Amino acid sequence: MALVVQKFGGSSLATAERIRRVAERIVETKKQGHDVVVVCSAMGDTTDDLLDLARQVAPEGSPRERDMLLTAGERISNALVAIAIHGLGVEARSLTGKRAGVITTGSHGNARILQMDPGRVRRALDDGEVVLVAGFQGVSQDSLDVTTLGRGGSDTTAVALAAALRADVCEIYTDVDGVFTADPRIVGDARKLDRITYEEMLEMAACGSKVLMLRCVEYARRYHVPVHVRSSYTDRVGTTVSGSIAELAPERAALTGVAHDRSEAKLTLVGLPDRPGYAARVFRAVADAEISIDMVLQNISRSGSGRTDLTFTLPKSDGARAVALLESRRDALGFAELRYDDRIGKVSLVGAGMKSRAGVTATFCDALAEAGINLDLITTSEIRISVLVADTDLDDAVRVLHTAFGLGGTEPAVVYAGTGR
Amino acid sequence: MALVVQKFGGSSLATAERIRRVAERIVETKKQGHDVVVVCSAMGDTTDDLLDLARQVAPEGSPRERDMLLTAGERISNALVAIAIHGLGVEARSLTGKRAGVITTGSHGNARILQMDPGRVRRALDDGEVVLVAGFQGVSQDSLDVTTLGRGGSDTTAVALAAALRADVCEIYTDVDGVFTADPRIVGDARKLDRITYEEMLEMAACGSKVLMLRCVEYARRYHVPVHVRSSYTDRVGTTVSGSIAELAPERAALTGVAHDRSEAKLTLVGLPDRPGYAARVFRAVADAEISIDMVLQNISRSGSGRTDLTFTLPKSDGARAVALLESRRDALGFAELRYDDRIGKVSLVGAGMKSRAGVTATFCDALAEAGINLDLITTSEIRISVLVADTDLDDAVRVLHTAFGLGGTEPAVVYAGTGR
């Protein structure tokens, strides 16, 4: 007998019919003799619909009240799944995030879990009940107000519960079959991965893979929770996220996949004084506005000019705000010109195998060059290479790299000879 | 400066536009210098829509989970009104029934308020905030599960809060202008009442007036809460429910109005043994099935037969269940035949003035007889006369009585001469 946490996304719960199917899957797991804890997202587009209503009522509105509003969505889906389980003759109990002991920071709309206190969940399990916990929500440690965890929050709830309950596995049911070597809508022979380490999944998520959100994977890694990403429409085995690259036998370290991201824009400050502290001042101004910077490039000073160019990427959605902010401080920051480009895309190759394989960077650049794709900014980590390309080249870049590294079909990833990356 | 509790019904909150208007009214009251506590029902048909979804998911379903589901409706409307108030630059804080201290029995779907613990509401008022409390919901004293209060529950929440906070008035905003002498859809010259005592309002509610639910009026009477029923679409003064008939000066005791009710059916057991205990056994069986009986008539025993007929009325919605129940026990209960008639209506005349006026019953019966309307069962209280008529005669009966007692227009109620009722 195992303890299984199962999380179902909004599209898996969009109609009464789908809710009944989800309930059947839960009951099946329960009848196999397992303890089952279920985390539900809000039905279909409920969260977006509620946000729309809020904007119609008042364009700004209080973050605390918005959280009060949004958490209703998970209460509804949760209670409906409980009712459906009851309809199949199995005892079930739904709990709000608060009653399930999800204790968070007070940052409304983007709270972080500080502590899990799953005593009530445990007692309900001991009573033989299926326990349903409303995802995406918790309670502020300080004010006791209800909070939400931000995008992908229900996945984080599920993983945090699995960690606190020492569950055997956290199953994330979604509308895809698992984690793929690339987006199957772009790459015809993209292959579903059977396993992936936490670090690789973190890099994939950070580079645009939308299957799991970054914060959820970080949580799973910290508490060693095996996560099984799988389809809610089939019984097929999905992708298991577990283990660290440090524990991987060298022969198992492979190239994982190609991720892409269309959500970033590029901002360049031309003619910034090339003296200590100027770049820091720019980053401080941007950080104070709670805008995240991803890639950074500072050009070498043009000889004798004492001036340099600073380029970085940031979310497109923050672009207008960043431009206005920096322009308003042009004199203090001392740059000559600001260039903003949101017609870019980022493509990344991820894999633990990169460490031990020479020539990966060379192959990467060669493949793109042969396809006539210009690279902009390039950044690397121990297990990742990312470059910016024109947005119109992005799909091609994904396909070219996927092929160049032999990630498709059932072929193993190719090992490259050469020296250095 | 007064403390005002304002309650808004679902139709007043059905759209973003209406929610903004409700917020404007709240802010206006606040800006007049009053402390304001607001109770919101769920938006429009939300509660019915959620119940529909629950039935699609599983026809039966757990009452506890249904309450979890339904309470989401008031969370949504409550948070949206808070957001709208914020949008007008005024601080507002929404609380669930639980956090507002609405402590109830554990009877899911029809819980009763046991205790109010409004400390948190009081503190938020002291902070200068408008406080919004989700109506219709509370928390079970024993299980700490969320509960709902049944039909009209938001009105009860508002009155209970007003009582606990010693509010100056509880305003119930609805889609009619107040309490009328009869249903204006039936009686053209029905008149809005300026004042009505608790007892009269209780009788009106018990006899089919839908403006306020019985339980809410009982609560208001017990705690002497003045209730102001008024339209959410106008600024007109509505009807104030306050005071007891015992305190009324005799000259102020009038005939209040004519109420009608289409929701009952009539059940007759023919040939029941006319011996002690047989009628009690019938009523016990019906009560055990949680079916409420309203009017009762036991005919005089037919001479020498030792048999009698027992007639009572009950909600139509429980009719099929009651018939099946009694038929299944025909032998034990000893009746010869069961007759069921759901094509009836009840019409009632209510008024504290009835006590001091002779001939009211005679005028009542004469008026109906002159209009060719047959009476069935008749029951009276100190301040009410009710009769059953054929459902097709009901509207006529309401009009005839309204005219006979001069309740319409701006005329005062007529005083009738005669002896006895």
Image (spheres, coloured by chain):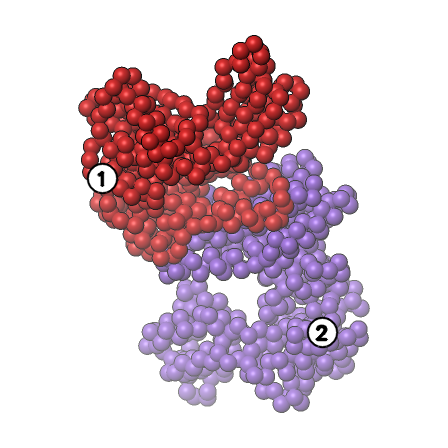
Chain colours: A purple, B red
Task: Give the amino acid at mark 2.
Answer: Ala
Looking at the picture, tell me which residue is in the foreground, A91 or A60: A91
Write the residue at 47% across / 57% down. A50
Alpha carbons under labels 1 and 2: distance apart? 80 Å
Q: Nearer the viewer, mark 1 or mark 2?
A: 1
- Residue A224 horizontal/vertical position (percent): 68, 53
* Number of other residues with Cα within 10 Å of mark 1, as a class: few under 14, some 14 to 19, many 20 or more: few
Answer above or below: position of A339 versus B90.
Answer: below
Figure check: B25 above or below B313: below
Q: Who's the residue at 62% across and 21% down the image?
A: B336
Q: Which residue is drawn at the image coordinates 47% and 49% (left, top)?
A: B46
Which residue corresponds to mark 1?
A: B409
Can you tell which mark lies on residue A190?
2
The answer to whether residue B82 is seen in the rendering is no
Measuring from the top left, give residue B8's x and y in whole percent. 36, 45
The foreground one among A310 and A14 is A14
Would residue B390 be found to the left or right of residue A76 on screen?
A: left
